[in-house]
Amino acid sequence: MKHFTISELIHSKTAVEKRIWNGANREQEDNLNALVSAVLDPVRERYGKAVHVSSGFRCAKVNGGLPNSSKRSQHMAGEAADIYTDAGPKGNYELGQLIAKLGNYDQLIFEDVGKGDMLPQWIHVSWKRRGDNRREIRKHVKGTGNVYPMVDRKEIGI
């Protein structure tokens, strides 16, 4: 881990507010290490600017307390992170494009985009250490609940 730490990947504002222990076990930490090695560090190197983690690992109790969170969320396995840049939605869009171009991801989601744009409030990215990575690109339009339609590479400008 060159640019990220386990402690920032398991930190949860929700867990702190609700006084929930959000510790990862060895398997989950190994998955987080793989996510950083395969995706996050290379993306940070190529992006050349700060990339922040708003949510990495989530225990089931933390995950269950979040709106629109899946009961099968890869966050609970340590396989996913929600990331963002200091440059706002435009920087987040560029970050998502870079991840798609590099090609190391299981799922890439442009989160909370507007109805007529692809400018995400953050990027969700996952990586599976075991099994096949699907390389799915999806979006979530703000205000549409749990709807995550597939996106083709043209829609994100690559």
Image: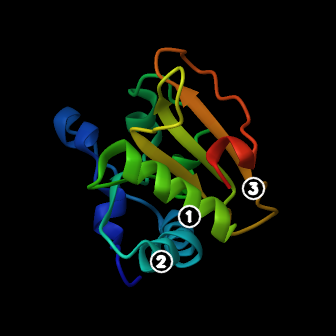
Residue 82 shows in the view: yes
Q: Residues within 10 Å of mark 3 (few under 14, many from 20)?
A: some
Q: Position of residue 94 (x, y in %)?
A: 48, 56
Which residue in the protein does label 2 denote? 46
Q: Sequence order check: which comes first, mark 1 or mark 2?
A: 2
Q: Position of residue 86 (x, y in %)?
A: 26, 55
| Residue shown at 68% from the left, 55% from the top | 158
Per the rendering, the mark at residue 98 is 1
Q: Residues within 10 Å of mark 2 (few under 14, many from 20)?
A: few
Which residue in the protein does label 3 denote? 135
Q: Disc 1 and disc 3: Cα gap in Å?
A: 13 Å
Q: Sequence order check: which comes first, mark 1 or mark 3?
A: 1
Q: What kind of residue is marked 3?
A: Arg
Q: Is residue 85 left or right of residue 100?
A: left
| Residue shown at 53% from the left, 54% from the top | 96
105 is higher (above) or lower (below) than 113: below
Q: Is residue 135 left or right of residue 84?
A: right
36 is higher (above) or lower (below) than 96: below
| Residue shown at 51% from the left, 29% from the top | 69
Q: What kind of residue is marked 1?
A: Leu
Residue 63 placement: quadrant: top left
Q: Decide: marks 1, 2 in contact (CB < 8 A)?
A: yes
| Residue shown at 29% from the left, 47% from the top | 12
Q: Decide: marks 1, 3 in contact (CB < 8 A)?
A: no
